[in-house]
Amino acid sequence: MTAVRAAFPPIADNAPRLIQRAEQLDADPLLGLRKIMQRLRQPVGGCPWDVKQTFESVAPYTLEEAYEVADAIARKNHTDLKEELGDLLLQVVFHAQIAAEQGLFDFDDVARGINEKMLRRHPHVFAGASVADAEEQTRRWEELKKAEKLARVNSQDAPAASALDAVSRGLPEWQRAIKLQKCAAELGFDWPGIAPVLDKLREEVAELDEAAHTENTAHQLEELGDVLFVAANVARHLKLDPASALRGCNLKFESRFRQMEQLAAASGLDLASLNLAEQDALWDEAKQIEKTATLNLRITD
């Protein structure tokens, strides 16, 4: 391993030293970040919170930062995107530092591994191969990824290989559902089009409706899972990202609800004190304001 072991002396508690240290780190920002993490993780003189962290305890923060990157992109806020990408990069450095301390691997190993993977996965760029278009490249990427995954599984004395072994268990469940479906579809196990998938969705919703009128929580959970799995299949057939769809729906709900709050406040009303019919009326008004604003924007464009 080639972990950076350079000493990182304590930072004096004064502005000039902090400015000087910032200037030193700016010469090589990535190396500087790694040194900062090394310093934070030192048992003596480091940060108590950083010192006690593990892969497991940091993992939720890693997921959170990835979602915050996606949120900044959705909001088209590039200032926030720069900051959130830095936060996500910190997660990589954090995990690599923990691994280096345990003699597992270090940041250079991580970078070297992704470099090698990108070379392997792009033979049309680096090895003289050719692809017709982006769609073919995506298909070849998945084929190479699957082959690499199966090779790792087979090398670990695992049970008989399955086409589904290439699907990581660490993915968000909606994403894993789509990848499982794609793997099955490659072997011919798939609906012929969107119509039967929508029929299946209606069937599963009806079964969930029946389960909802029982006291069997386990059965309700199973039926809800079936609905969500088929909904993911609908997204796959339409070539849509279900997370983007839900994110858009969340933003729309948030916008309308905030508008409801503002309408209620403008009338001197407490939204929580209104009955459902009165709240529904505000919701409809908020929807109309939203539609008018959208129409005006289109006319302006």
Image (tube, rainbow, N blue to C red):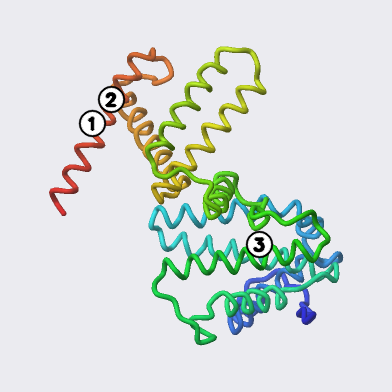
Q: Which residue is mark 1?
A: 288
Q: Is 58 on the left-hand or right-hand side of 1? A: left
Q: Are marks 2 and 1 in contact (CB under 8 Å)?
A: yes
69 to 296, vertically: above or below: below
Q: Which residue is mark 2?
A: 284
Q: Amino acid at mark 3?
A: Gln
Q: Are marks 2 and 3 in contact (CB under 8 Å)?
A: no
Percent of width and height locating residue 85: 54, 64
For the point 81% across and 62% down, the residue is: 156
For the point 76% across and 70% down, the residue is: 39
For the point 66% across and 65% down, the residue is: 92
Q: Which residue is mark 3?
A: 91
Looking at this view, is 221 or 287 the one in front?
Answer: 221
Q: Mark 3: few, some, or many residues within 10 Å (few <14, many ≥20)? A: some
Label 2 – label 1 distance at C-alpha:
6 Å
Query: Which quadrant of the figure has residue 264?
Result: top left
- Secondary structure of residue under mark 3: helix
Q: Are marks 3 and 1 in contact (CB under 8 Å)?
A: no
Q: Amino acid at mark 1?
A: Gln
Q: Amino acid at mark 2?
A: Asp
Mark number displayed over residue 242 = none
